[in-house]
Amino acid sequence: MINTLCRRLGTPVRNTADLKQAMLTDHLRGSKRPLFIDEAHRLHVSGLEAVRDLVDDAGIPVILGGTIDLSKKVNDTTMFYGQFNSRI
């Protein structure tokens, strides 16, 4: 998912994952551009964590579309007090 976002925004894809995330954050910070992700239920947990980091670090709104499986993936109310679920 991060590679796709990098390509769409013209950010180099050949960097490390942390550097790509930082470059995306810098590119999107303050833009208030919403990020729409359809089929979000197909994302792995690491992809969802990357989305969460973009929300926190870049301050952009993110809209996730998906099946009930997405809700199950982000339901952390009993384990982590809803820190992830509260962002969705």
Image: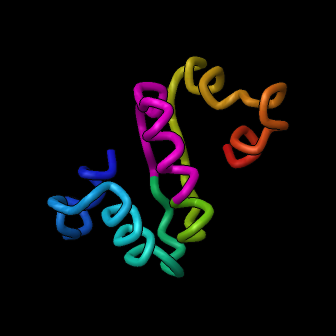
Q: Position of residue 74 (x, y in %)?
A: 64, 31
Instruction: Say if 69 sits above or below 17 in the image.
Output: above
Which residue appears farthest toward the bottom when viewing the image? 30
Q: Is residue 53 left or right of residue 17?
A: right
Write down the region rendered in magenta.
36-53
Instruction: Say if 11 sits above or below 71 in the image.
Output: below
Q: Pick whichever, 20 or 36, lies toward us.
A: 20
Q: Position of residue 12 (x, y in %)?
A: 18, 67
Residue depicted at x 62% and y 63%: 56
Specify whether residue 18 is painted magenta. Answer: no
Residue depicted at x 74% and y 30%: 76
Quarter of the picture containing the C terminus is top right
How many marks can you see? 0
Name the colouring of the figure. Answer: rainbow
Residue depicted at x 47% and y 49%: 50
Q: Is residue 49 left or right of residue 82?
A: left
Q: Position of residue 27 (x, y in %)?
A: 38, 76
Q: Position of residue 28 (x, y in %)?
A: 43, 73
Q: Is residue 33 left or right of residue 71?
A: left
- Asked which quadrant contains residue 61, the reply is bottom right
Q: Pick whichever, 8 or 20, lies toward us.
A: 20
Instruction: Say if 10 sits above or below 68 in the image.
Output: below
- Asked which quadrant contains residue 6, the reply is bottom left
Specify whether residue 51 is painted magenta. Answer: yes
Q: Main secondary structure of the magenta part?
A: helix
Q: Pick whichever, 35 or 49, lies toward us.
A: 49
Quarter of the picture containing the N terminus is top left
Residue depicted at x 54% and y 74%: 32
